[in-house]
Image (tube, grey):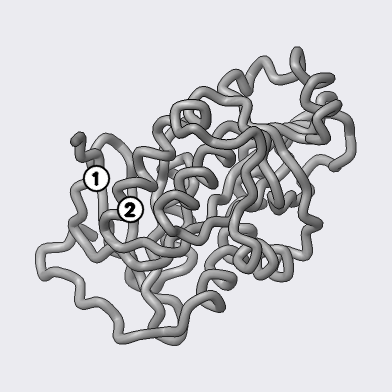
Amino acid sequence: MARYLKPTAPIAPAAVLTGDPKRAMELATDLFERPLMSNLQRGLWGYWGELDGGLGLTVQSTGIGGPSAVAVLHELAGHGVRHAIRVGACLSLDQSFSLGEIVVVEEALATDGASRALDAPPAVAPDRALTAALAARTGARPAQVATTDALHDATTAAERHRDAGAPAVDGCTAPLAALASHLGVAFACALVVAEDGREALSYEELDRALLEVGRSAAAALAEAQPASEPDSPPAAAAR
């Protein structure tokens, strides 16, 4: 089996997942006093650190799209991850959500290839308890989204997704939720509306919004599991 991650620091039982390695670095720097780089392999930057109270947390980038994301989650689960929250962006299809609004996913339509490869059902629900904790932390209303491989051409399928009940689309929530359920990982997802069909957030605005959502995700994960003895990072861990 391929090994995409080569940990150089502990992998915590709880993880925040984000696609962009730059955002993983920024979130880890914001959350941890002493972040340790836990993965550099293949540009999938990952970090380990401690939240207030001593709870270890991993912040891991997953790359672009479902196939990359599920490969990363599969390996994280092999390293002991049992709770994970994805923090990402989505496209609003019908102005049900305003630009910059947070969407907590209560169900994801599996219209992507990675979900089909995982034999996912047509709609996949993330973990209810973790989703409720995330919704409470973000103040966002839970909603359905559709996951597609062709995110840049999502507007051409907008009517089909809307008819199925999904007012927004993203690139990897459905296969992550499907794989997490198979692996016994509690999974939830919060998405920032980056485009609404008329305009889009700037990179700076999206970065700020995702950083705030990442803080909420870390707080929800801290609630989901009690603090334990912090892991001892290896002496040679990368900084």
Whether the residues at callouts 2 and 1 have beta carbons within 8 Å, the answer is: yes
- Determine whether 196 is above or below 183 in the image: above
Q: Position of residue 145 (x, y in %)?
A: 72, 38
Give the quarter of the image for residue 110. top right
Quadrant showing the C terminus: bottom left
Q: Is residue 8 left or right of residue 14?
A: left
The residue closer to the viewer here, 24 or 208, is: 24
Quadrant showing the N terminus: top left
Q: Position of residue 63 (x, y in %)?
A: 42, 35
| Secondary structure of residue under mark 1 | loop
Three-letter code, disc 1: Leu
Three-letter code, disc 2: Leu
| Secondary structure of residue under mark 2 | helix
**What residue is at 33 percent from the left and 53 percent from the top?**
76
**Could you say which disc has been placed on residue 5 in the image?**
1
Q: Position of residue 32 (x, y in %)?
A: 41, 70
- Determine whether 186 is above or below 44 in the image: below
**What residue is at 43 percent from the left and 60 percent from the top?**
15
**What residue is at 48 percent from the left and 28 percent from the top?**
114
**What residue is at 51 percent from the left and 27 percent from the top?**
116
For disc 2, the marked residue is 76
Which of the two marks, 2 or 1, is nearer to us in this view?
A: 2
Per the model, the C-alpha gap separating discs 2 and 1 is 8 Å
